[in-house]
Amino acid sequence: MNGVDWLLLVTIVIITGIQTFRGLKDFDVVLYEMIAFIISSALSIKLYISISELLTVNPFYALIFLYIIIAIILLIIANIIANQTEFSWHPFNSILSFVFGLATSWAILFVLLRIAIIATSPETAIRIPLINSESIAKSVIVKEILEFKTYQAIIHFLSKLTVSG
């Protein structure tokens, strides 16, 4: 494990811990924020190239600003919805908040790693401490976040169980 792996692990623990603590009373805010971050990650990754070509800006800046704008709009909507639909499932609030916190940290890191990959490319050549193209390529956690290897292995295993069972 290199420095990027440790940085990512600490970030995952911090985000998951914050979301778990916030969801102890009501997990609905954490749920809606998770959905907002996943949607903003997917939309920004899908649209940043066309936006950068349309505005003739560097894809690095297009992805950052697009993600921030979409995330802010969706987080405002998520908070409005959470205020209107307050619900809780008391025996499972902490467990659900922990799972939603993990998903939130994955969605945030997914976009941040894409931004880091663009930033460390030879065309952009922006220097980020601890992060360069070699450390990203060697990182085990980067591969997990960007390629879903564990998720795919679990789904493959479960599909074998259902077929053989």
Image (cartoon, rainbow, N blue to C red):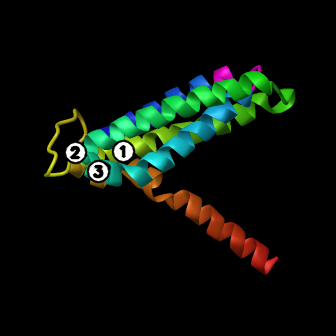
Judging by the rendered image, the residue that carries numbered circle 3 is 54
Q: Which residue is mark 2?
A: 58
SS state under label 3: helix
Name the secondary structure under disc 2: loop
Q: Which mark is residue 1?
A: none
Depth check, mark 1 against mark 2: the one in front is 2
**Would residue 9 appear left or right of 21 to someone viewing this image?**
left
Residue 119 lies, in percent from the top left, at 23, 43
Q: Nearer the viewer, residue 116 or 17?
A: 116
- Residue 57, how many percent across, how many down? 22, 44
Which circle, 3 or 2, is nearer the viewer?
3
Q: Residues within 10 Å of mark 1 (few under 14, many from 20)?
A: some
Q: Earlier in the sequence, mark 1 or mark 3?
A: 3
Q: Can residue 6 be seen by looking at this rendering?
A: no
Label 1 – label 2 distance at C-alpha: 17 Å
The kind of residue tagged 3 is Leu
Where is mark 1, residue-wise?
A: 113
Q: Amino acid at mark 1?
A: Leu
- First to last magenta residue range: 20-26
Q: How far apart in space, not on screen, are marks 3 and 2 (Cα)? A: 11 Å
Q: Quadrant of the C terminus?
A: bottom right
Give coordinates of residue 128: x percent, y percent: 22, 35
Q: Residues within 10 Å of mark 3 (few under 14, many from 20)?
A: few
Residue at the spot 52% in from the left edge and 37% down from the top edge: 105
Q: Residues within 10 Å of mark 2 (few under 14, many from 20)?
A: some
Q: Which residue is depicted at the point 63% across and 70% down?
A: 156
Q: Which amino acid lies under the numbered mark 2 shown in the image of this protein?
A: Asn
